Amino acid sequence: MSNIINLNNSENAMVQEIMAMHSYRRPHGSQTEKEYRDRFIVPLGAVEDQNRNLILKIGENPKTLWSSHTDSVHRGEGPQRIILEGDIIKLHKKSKSSCLGADDAAGNWLMMEMIRAQVPGLYVFHHAEEVGGIGSNALLKNNPELLHGIQAAVAFDRKGKTSVITHQGARTCSDAFAKSLAVQLPEGYKIDTGGTFTDTKVYRGVIPECTNVSVGYENAHTSRELLDVKHIMHLRNFLISIDPTSFVIERDPKSVDTYSGYGGGFRKGWYDDEAAYGAGHKGRAIGGVASVPKGKAKKGEPTSMIDLVWDYADEVSDILDESGIDFQDLWFLVQERIAQRELAKEIISPVQLAITNAEREVENKLQSAAKAGTKPPHPPTGSKPTVKVQAGKAGSTPGERVAAQFSGSDVTVKPTTQTTQTNNTSTALVRVDPVDANPTPVVTIAPPEEKVG
């Protein structure tokens, strides 16, 4: 039951629905995200488009696009334990989830309530906002006709309780529009120029007014994330009676402001509106592997660059801003790093990957012998441990140990010899033989004192 006092039955049902929605961890494309969409959004009549966005239209020729996204930055999928303390939803103290996911389940719920109230508009529950606005970019590219006639795009994907965003890096909506929207929201809502990215930014070149509205959550993308249920329900009461025809439309979408900052110029990219998060939920990949020397960190303090950025996202963001590094330049660098990583994955074939694993097995054996104080089992002088890719099953010859296994009928390898340094004193010769007879080659390691047949 709800901990908020003085709720009627209808309000209590709303709280229970909000709680249920936040019990899902929803990384983009996960099974849990699909179950969440199927349970809460699809039954309202929303239909998935070719870009995996859920879309519903109310009214003829709507002028306003209402936006939120269904994915979260959770590191894993499945259910999570949450609690309601007073007016606040947050993770249970025993939960191991990386975040609450109010970014953007809160926005989803508000749009669901607007749909139930039949507020006119084009409702888009976007796919994969947290990893680069994939759904919104795909919609703009593949279905631009859907946006014809839309004059305003309003997202419910902002932290806090007072923001009507006018700038997402560059200006994306006019002050006049922001004011005409704010007067229809609870007291305290006002212009905020400090936005960065949500899906509505993608449409700034074709839709005149593109904004983002606070929905009552804080500390997004962290385990300290929380949602003020009292605020979101209060906001809901205004939104279900909002009048889009009273919006003031002034901005020319063809006059897209440039963004100047560190490095100069505006680069196309994305940076989520709620945290210094960089590469999305799977990456946690700003910075390197620098860490605190063992024994120096106090209990509970971060011990690596990754943990530091993850745990203190707001502070890191402020430091970067104060250092002259704006979000567009940082995201540009992150994109370059991601592209390099993906290219490397494409270059590394299954055989190369298997060889790398095999080399590691040889090195581990030599290092284990050294730690044990025994003489490494080297063969006679001039001989070296051999790794061979062969057609056959693991364990078919004495002394075999499987390092990696893969399958694929298109795997063929030309004879080659590679030499790799395994430690300061030992070098392992890696021999790769042709693999044609068996579509399931196995990488095996023969100890130095034995031969591979």
Image (tube, helix red, strand yellow):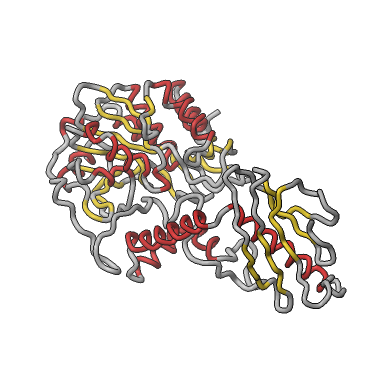
Q: Is residue 42 left or right of residue 308?
A: left
Q: Is residue 130 left or right of residue 193?
A: right
Write down the quadrant of residue 193 in the picture.
bottom left
Quadrant location, the N terminus: top right
Q: Position of residue 25 (x, y in %)?
A: 53, 39
Residue at image x 78%, y 58%?
Answer: 452
User: Is residue 218 or residue 310 the one in the foreground?
Assistant: 310
Q: Position of residue 300 (x, y in %)?
A: 62, 61
Instruction: Please determine whether, in this image, residue 181 is positioned above or below residue 273.
Output: above
Q: Is residue 427 left or right of residue 396?
A: left
Instruction: Please determine whether, in this image, residue 22 is positioned above or below residue 428.
Output: above
Q: Is residue 248 left or right of residue 451?
A: left
User: Is residue 65 or residue 359 the one in the foreground?
Assistant: 359
Instruction: Please determine whether, in this image, residue 368 is positioned above or below residue 1.
Output: below
Residue at image x 74%, y 47%?
Answer: 392
Residue at image x 29%, y 31%?
Answer: 239
Q: Mark yes or no: residue 339 visible.
A: yes
Q: Mark yes or no: residue 12 visible.
A: no
Quadrant location, the C terminus: bottom right
Q: Position of residue 105 (x, y in %)?
A: 44, 37
Q: Position of residue 398 (x, y in %)?
A: 85, 54
User: Is residue 192 or residue 351 the one in the foreground?
Assistant: 351
